[in-house]
Image (cartoon, rainbow, N blue to C red):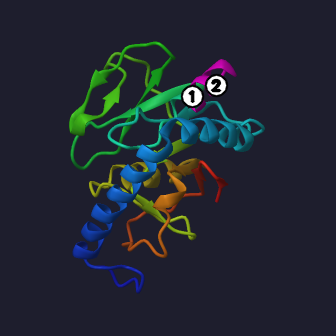
Amino acid sequence: MSDDPNANDPGAKAALRLASALKRDAAHAAGAAHAAAQVARHGLGVLGERSFRTVSGYWPMRSELDIRPLLELLAEAGRDVAFPAVLGPAQPLEFRRWRPGEALVTGRFGTAHPAPEAKRLEPDVLLVPLLAFDAGHHRLGYGAGFYDRTLAALRRHKPVLAIGVAYAAQRVEAVPRDAWDEPLDLVLTEEGIL
């Protein structure tokens, strides 16, 4: 447990993960295709005018909001797109280049990413999946800490823009957090940018 007054015990995070997964499932069932189109529109609005080379996305699993339409538009606009790969339990993520239409391989935890021989990239912008978020840009992930470790490592040597991607229904009053939890810069939902 952290000394941070906003931190909670692991049981609080576990309970919120379960409740948030159910909210996300319901939002996904109610309008996944519409949400994906809106996120592509809002995402282009916030990223289209920014100067950056590489964006990291993700291949959606379970009921994660589908950002593939946004990634395809960014690739068409000349941006490099990468997907994260899990290398090991206590390591940061590795980012591998992906182009629309390229095959992916199955990774740990059911993720999908480019094959190990794909070109390694270092993202300037990260589109991050999550289970819950709050108005302070705090994110509740799956609990393994991969994005926290990765963001901390990247932020030590360059500015990066971390954008959480979620259904608006995933917003909660407050995400319990610990000292090592890395905040997001923005949150992108089907309703717009927070």
Circle 2 is placed at which residue position?
Answer: 73
Q: Name the residue: 21% across, 47% down.
A: 89
Is 78 colored magenta in this rendering? yes
Q: Name the residue: 65% across, 41% down.
A: 43
* Disc 1 element: helix
What is the three-letter code of the residue carrying label 2? Leu
**Residue 155 coordinates in the image, percent (x, y):** 52, 52
How many marks the image carries: the answer is 2
Position of 43 compared to 15: left or right? right
Position of 34 compared to 18: left or right? right
**Residue 8 coordinates in the image, percent (x, y):** 32, 79
* Of the two numbered discs 1 and 2 in the rendering, the one whose residue sits closer to the viewer: 1
Q: Name the residue: 61% across, 41% down.
A: 39
Q: Tell me the CA gap for discs 1 and 2.
A: 6 Å
* Disc 2 element: helix
193 vs 58: above or below: below
Is 194 colored magenta in this rendering? no
Q: Is residue 144 visible?
A: yes
* In front of the other: 170 or 133: 170
The quadrant the C terminus occupies is bottom right
Residue range corresponding to the magenta coloring? 70-79
At label 2, counting other C-alpha atoms closer than 10 Å, the crowd grade (few under 14, some 14-19, many 20 or more) is some
The quadrant the N terminus occupies is bottom left
What is the three-letter code of the residue carrying label 1? Pro
Q: Is residue 182 visible?
A: no
Circle 1 is placed at which residue position?
Answer: 69
Q: Marks 1 and 2: CB-CB under 8 Å?
A: yes
**Residue 22 coordinates in the image, percent (x, y):** 33, 57
